[in-house]
Image (cartoon, rainbow, N blue to C red):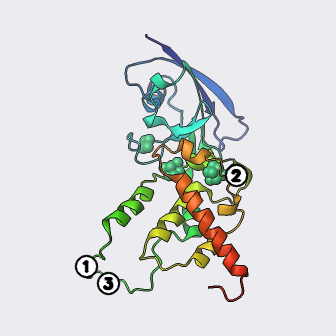
Amino acid sequence: MDRTLKFNVFRYNPMARGTAPRMDTFVLPEIPSMTLFIALNQIREEQDPSLQFDFCCRAGICGACGMLINGRPGLACKTKTKDLPGEITLLPLPVFKLVGDLSVDTGSWFREMYSRVGSWIHSDKEFDPLAEEERMDNALANEIYELERCVECGCCVAGCGTARMRKDFLGAVALNRIARFALDPRDKRTDRDYFEIIGDDNGIFGCMGLLGCEDVCPKELPLQDQLGFLRRKMGLTAIRRFLPGAK
Ligand code: SF4
Ligand code: SF4
Ligand code: FES
């Protein structure tokens, strides 16, 4: 059935002095296979060239087009309008700094997070550009690859109650990074090293375990498993810290 879609879109330019946030309404005829990305582009081309939103790949790969879609974090380019009601409300992702309208600055947040978790292989080996690549067991490589599929969209952070309440909470995406390095035999960090990074309320012990993160992850990363894995690992590390002579 042909539908006319009504879009309620958050508008605000924090750089424009004296303006206040508002909602604008746009109306569009739905077309077959329409995604929110297509609809927003059409609105910008035909109705309001000042509308701000981010996109790059249009294929669920760059993670740029995250937004709140009828209250739920998701990717505009992966969301088909046929799966939504006729009235669609779009808001920018919370937690991240607002650039304007639906565009947020996830880049700064992710840069800071990667620096806090030390998001690289920590090894004491000298880098030799001529050396052959180290071999890795296929099953383990696949396990690591599974966690590397994150596209840094920020949906899990925006959908996380703790991240909304606690500004410094690392969020599921950072905990997933730690789980990824903890699996990697090339990373020489110990559980105690990881505990220094995530062993408090801004890390794994601040996570309430209600799994809004996994529910909204557009790449379906197994975040629940990683949070459980780290909670056990860091819980044991905490106990060992208080046992005399424990390593
Ligand atoms: S399970 Fe933890 S990280 Fe995931 S949404 Fe809940 S509090 Fe946030
Ligand atoms: S874990 Fe999922 S929701 Fe979170 S940033 Fe990565 S892809 Fe996005
Ligand atoms: S535009 Fe790249 S994920 Fe949507």
Label 1 close to label 2 by CB (< 8 Å): no
Q: What residue type is labelled 2?
A: Thr
Q: Which numbered disc covers residue 162?
A: 2
Q: Dividing the picture into quarters, in which one does residue 125 lie?
A: bottom left
Q: Which amino acid does label 1 sit on?
A: Glu
Q: Nearer the viewer, residue 238 or 11?
A: 238
Label 2 CB-ligand 1 distance < 8 A? yes
Q: Horizontal placement of 8 versus 152: left or right?
A: right
Instruction: Residue under label 3, please give it.
Output: 128
Check disc 3 and report its element: helix, strand or loop.
loop
Instruction: Residue under label 1, please give it.
Output: 132
At 43% across and 71% down in the image, what residue appears? 184
Tell me which label, 1 or 2, sits earlier in the chain: 1
Q: Where is residue 115 in the image (x, y as percent from the top left)?
A: 56, 68
Location of the C terminus (image quadrant):
bottom right
Closer to viewer: mark 2 or mark 3: 2
- Dot 2: within a 10 Å radius of its alpha carbon, few (fewer than 14), some, or many (20 or more) residues? many
